[in-house]
Amino acid sequence: MADLPRRPERAPPALPGRFRRATRGSLGVEMAVLMWPLVMLLVGITQFLMHAYTQVLLSNALFDSAARPETELTAGDAAGYKTKVCAKILLLTQAGCRARLVVEMTQLSSAATSATAVTGATFSPGATKDLLLLRAALPSVRYVPFLPVLTAKASVVFRRA
């Protein structure tokens, strides 16, 4: 027999065959890599939804007050009005809501024409037939510490009866 040409030597595999073929546990590793971004995305979406819901509840509370002014509004009782508004906001405890809610009411003629922050400095009921500007601001609950605090703001103009 003639000498057959020999095959060139192959380099040994980097990993033994049983390790190259092993796939058990790969799903666990993939889930561990993908889980944190998915959890953070879901928590961020929840954070945004809570802010949007707080905004809707605060706006509805102020519009209800404009349609049927409470006695606290006509008397100029800011603390009592905060209690009424916080009873309509279901996401926060009463004490936490009252501590964080800022309301102010002023006559429309004396309100600033440029955008100003709601400071709660004035809560004047005005006189009968006055146009009043009622504004409120409430920081939303924050679940994600590295996101900024979102503040729900609402305002309404109404005529005092």
Image (spheres, rainbow, N blue to C red):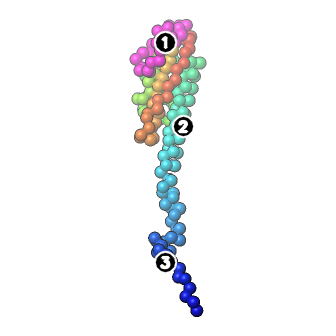
Residue 113's label in the rendered image is: 1
Q: Does 50 sit above or below residue 152?
A: below
- Disc 2 residue type? Leu
User: Is residue 66 visible to the viewer in this orientation of the structure?
Assistant: yes
| Residue 126 sits inside the magenta stretch | yes
In the image, which residues are magenta? Answer: 107-132
Secondary structure character of the magenta stretch overall: loop
Q: Does 33 sit above or below residue 96?
A: below
Q: Badges 3 and 2: C-beta atoms under 8 Å apart? A: no
Residue 9's label in the rendered image is: 3
Q: Alpha-carbon neighbours of circle 3 within 10 Å: few (<14), some, or many (≥20)?
A: few
Q: Nearer the viewer, residue 119 or 9?
A: 9
x, y (%) of residue 142?
45, 38
Depth check, mark 3 against mark 2: the one in front is: 3
Measuring 41% from the left and 20% from the top, which residue is drawn there? 119
Q: Alpha-carbon neighbours of circle 1 within 10 Å: few (<14), some, or many (≥20)?
A: few
